[in-house]
Image (cartoon, coloured by chain):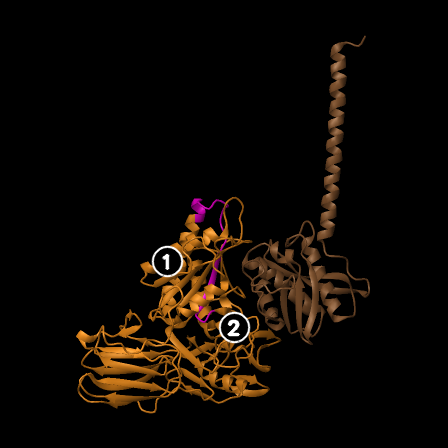
Chain colours: A orange, B brown
Amino acid sequence: MAIAGAVPGQQLTVYTAKASYSLPVFDRGGKPYIAVADLLSPLGASPPHLKGKDWRLELDKAEARFTEGKDKASIRGQQADLSGKALVEDGRVMVPMAAALPLLSRLLNTAVDFHQPSRRIFVGNDFTHFTAEFKDGDAPSLVLNFSQPLKRLDSNHEEDRGALLFTHTNKTTLTFRKDPLVSDTNQQQFGNGAIQALTFTEENGTASITITGNRPLLISRSEDGKTITLQVQAPAATAASEPTQLSAPASPEGQRHAPEFFVMIDPSHGGNDKGASFGGKLVEKDITLRLARELRKELEERGIATRLLRDSDIDLSLERRAEITNEQHAGLYVALHAGRPGRGVRVYASFLTDPQQPVASRFMPWESAQSGALGRSQIAARAVSDELRKKGLTVANLAMPVRPLNNLTAPAIAVELTPETDDPQSPENLKRQSTVAAAVAAAIAQVRGQLGGRP
Amino acid sequence: MIPRHFQITIALVLLAVLISGVVIIRMTHKEEALTLQAAEAAPVAPVVGGKQEHIQVLLAYDEDRVLRWRPADVFLPADRGLRARETLRYVLAQYLQTPSPHPLGKGSDIKDVYFISDDTMIVDTTAPFADGHPSGILLEEMTLTSLIETLTANVPGIAKVKFLVDGKERETLAGHADLMSFYQTAAVHELAKEFE
């Protein structure tokens, strides 16, 4: 179900030892609101359900109760101030963004630090700190040392050249979307040369380090992910200078870690796995491959990079599909299916079958790897559903444990369409596939900024 | 003296009777074989060790893409494991009827049901349950949700359920629905709302 009024691009980011995730912020009467399910589902909370007049949910056996129109909630049996009235829209409970603090701290029974202006919430004392070490000389450099390995690095104007990132401007911004990065000082000066100053900023659920100077810089990351080095690019020595490589390994298929946002398109089934049969010669694996190629074309026309998990009739296990997608750090995974019964299109986000599975370490359990991206998956699913409806299609937006959605660390959705007829080449089927591909691509382009890509 | 054309007519009539007889005998045998096959494919009748109970079962209706609670009178033993098995078998039996609200492959059955802890249950199904299951996200999820919801409604204290196929783990039911995970019954209760 779609919720109207999301402020375009505005997000709240939650950092926990288990996962980091972002959720959309909605405007309700000039006040920022969030959906309770977006905030708590990635942590394993049950979806809020109506019992009597109260909406209830559970997280690790702790209960929270909300009443529509009331500005107080009951958390673990104690009253908590929500800083505004609880709203219920399309079966979803919405609360003021400020209520995230009491909700998380009391339900998780732990310390929570809320940087409200920048919309960043830190659960537990799991912060990443950094120090900056400037080295002057013929080839000045700036070494950033982080207290724990970084999850992901985005920089402005970079391009992937064999695992080295190059910038093309005199102002380099490193954006940290997944790391609980904090700093005691917001600005450091280094002089008037190639590297002049460092500025730390927090806004819209992200942290950024901006380095200004008078020349482009070469960025590299150490193998343990705890150090970033920025060096002046010496034109003649660029190819020879070999700072340490990015930490992400290249996939067995030979494709390297992609820092850019791209959509991994998965034409489901293939080879001996035909998928569903629709009478005659029409089988699911053929529909999904054709639809995948259409979607690739539509996305690339909108300037969004894509990769196909298969572009021919080959066998590829579900586990391998998830592994490849995770290894290559896709910005969004879209599985394509075709099935009956019914008409129209069904859009699925993940449903965690065992949301309270314990996390023993920083490694995410395979069966609930999706938990950190669930909120963004739901954003993508809702956007795709809305766009399909605009095209006049009958659409159902569902949460189901469809393999391998739960094994993916990226936002992930599945789109299932029902064929109009049993003839794969019938004009009705071909037209339907084109319409679906165009709508899915348009939706992805709309919410790309909320999924981790640049809008 | 019987005229020649009359002789030919009698011979043709006798031949027709003979052929009809052979066809009827073969059709009868085929029908018997089919009936026997169907009887073998259907789940075995419940263990008559318990008492007849009036329970609620959640059945899938493909036509409407919904799950609906239906009353049923089923013989259920007191033992939790047997009770769980017979409850699940009753649901599968409804799907194996003709016509069926949610057709499954012949031979779909529950081989065994056992607890690995007080609240965690393993359901071991026959190979035809998965091999013959129609492929499709919705159809597969409807089957699993129907079974788990019926189970938890009639056998108290089950928090997690996992399905095996012929004693082994399988990645999906028929290409889509996750069979590797343990299904938390409270979460499935929420999932069932998608089919209301």
Q: Which residue is nearer to you in this view: A276 or A27?
A: A276
Q: Is residue B142 placed above or below A371 in the rendered structure?
A: above
Give the amino acid at mark 2.
Ser
**Residue A49: percent from left, percent from top:** 58, 73
Q: Quadrant of residue A116?
A: bottom left
Q: Is residue A3 visible?
A: no
Q: Which residues are magenta?
A: A408-429
In-image side of A219 versus A432 (left or right): left
- The residue lying furthest to the front in this view is A240
Q: Quadrant of residue B67?
A: bottom right
Give the amino acid at mark 1.
Arg
Q: Which residue is mark 2?
A: A368
Q: In the image, is residue A339 part of the stretch drawn in magenta?
A: no
Q: Is residue B189 placed above or below A341 in the rendered structure?
A: below
Q: Find residue A296 and name its label.
A: 1
Q: Specify the subunit that label 1 lies on.
A: A
